[in-house]
Image (spheres, helix red, strand yellow):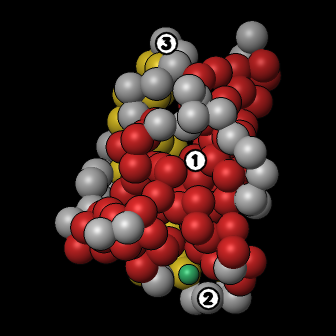
Amino acid sequence: MNIEQLYRQVIMDHYKYPKNKGLVGDASYLTIHLNNPSCGDEMTVQLMCQEGIIKDVRHQGTGCSICCASASVMTETLKTKPIPDAEKIIHEFYEMIKGYPFNPEVLKGDAVVFQGVAQFPARIKCATLAWKALEQGLTHLKEEETQHG
Ligand code: ZN
């Protein structure tokens, strides 16, 4: 099995057996919904932070295998991370998806299996949709914090 086959296998595993899938009816979670009209992907991400740490991330969506698998990987990668670390990881993920060099010390684990997406510009939005949703959630929390001191 070469590395591309291995990556494809990991993506299919996350698609078939997603981690942290399903939404919760808990008011302490922030819910963000995004869609990707170019592919028909719909993604809802729920985020719960406490004392600057991402305590839980959930996702629920319909879409292509890249989009759904990436949501699963995103939750697994960012759950339990302090917010500043999560922001760095998200940045490295975007760099990788765009085909730029990324820091493997920051971006670890299954997230690296999406590096092949850089060769397929039409799929970039699929791979980043859940990550963008989480990023919006973090931005929203920061804005709330500044408003309430
Ligand atoms: Zn898609």
Checking the image for residue 39, the label placed there is: 2
Q: Please name the amino acid that badge 1 sits on.
A: Leu
Q: Position of residue 6 (x, y in %)?
A: 34, 65
Q: Does residue 99 appear anywhere in the picture?
A: yes
Distance CA(mark 2)–CA(mark 1): 19 Å
Query: Dot 2: what SS?
Result: loop
Is residue 69 visible in the rendered structure shown here? no
Q: Secondary structure at mark 3?
A: loop
Most foreground residue, 51 or 72: 72
Q: Earlier in the sequence, mark 3 or mark 1?
A: 3
Quadrant that contains the C terminus: top right
User: Which is nearer the N-term, disc 2 or disc 3?
Assistant: 2
Residue 58 point in image, percent of width and height: 37, 50
Q: Disc 1 on helix, strand or loop?
A: helix
Q: What is the crowding at mark 1: few (fewer than 14 residues within 10 Å), some, or many (at least 20)? A: many
- Give the residue at x 56% y 26%: 105
Residue at 59% from the left image edge and 53% from the top image edge: 131
Q: From this view, report whether residue 91 is shown above or below residue 87.
A: below
Q: Earlier in the sequence, mark 2 or mark 1?
A: 2
Residue that mark 3 sits on: 51
- Classed neighbour count for the residue bearing mark 3: other residues with Cα under 10 Å, few (<14), some (14–19), many (≥20): few
Residue 92, by quadrant, is: top right
Disc 2 residue: CB within 8 Å of ligand 1:
yes
Dot 3 amino acid type: Glu
Determine which residue is flagged by label 1.
134
